Image: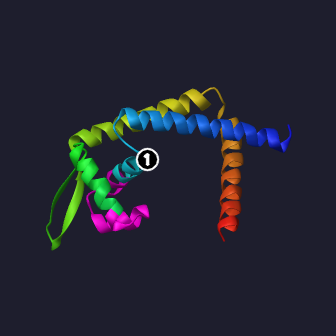
Amino acid sequence: MKSERLLDTLLTITEALGADMDRYLRDNGLTTARAHLLWTLHRGGPAKQRDLAAALGHSPRNVTTLVDELVAAGHVIRRDHPGDRRAFLVELTPQAVTLLEVMAASHVELAGQLFGHLDARTRNELGEQLTGLAQRLATLVGEERG
């Protein structure tokens, strides 16, 4: 298969996965940025907004907006930080924890649907190839942004 056809196939996969993710997030009242913030809290626990900004690579103002939206949607709460009276802690609500658990289960289900028919050796080989491709792409994109 020609390299151009491989790239076309990869772009088709990327587009389909992106559209599926966007649809899933939209159906749950989320954007990619909001979901990323929720996953960051899920992995790391309650956090100060400035720490979230650093972890996400966003400006503090942007994170304030994201947190405001997530508070309005019932996904996070702000509470006073016990050791810093000038700061708030942002934490997940039980509703958000449930949503993230469902999202994680959906992730596992899709992985099974896409790769479950492959034996372990084939999955490992594919994983190595995709990892190498991802590293190569990151290098190329990094070179372009230079």
What residue do we see at 62% from left, 40% from top? Answer: 14
**Residue closer to the observer: 51 or 16:** 16
- Report crowding for label 1: few under 14, some 14 to 19, many 20 or more residues within 10 A (C-alpha): few
Image side of residue 98 versus residue 125, left or right: left
Q: Main secondary structure of the magenta part?
A: helix
The magenta stretch spans which residues? 40-61
Image side of residue 82 versus residue 34, left or right: left
Q: Amino acid at mark 1?
A: Thr
- Residue named by callout 1: 32
From the top left corner, tell me how far across and down residue 137 is, in percent.
69, 56
Image quadrant holding the C terminus, namely: bottom right
**Residue closer to the observer: 36 or 65:** 65
What residue do we see at 65% from left, 67% from top? Answer: 145
From the top left corner, tell me how far across and down residue 82 is, in percent.
13, 68
What residue do we see at 33% from left, 57% from top? Answer: 44
Image quadrant holding the N terminus, namely: top right
Query: Which quadrant would residue 119 be assigned to in this image?
Result: top right
From the top left corner, tell me how far across and down residue 122 is, in percent.
70, 36
Q: Say if the magenta span includes residue 99.
A: no
**Picture layout, residue 76 above or below residue 59:** above
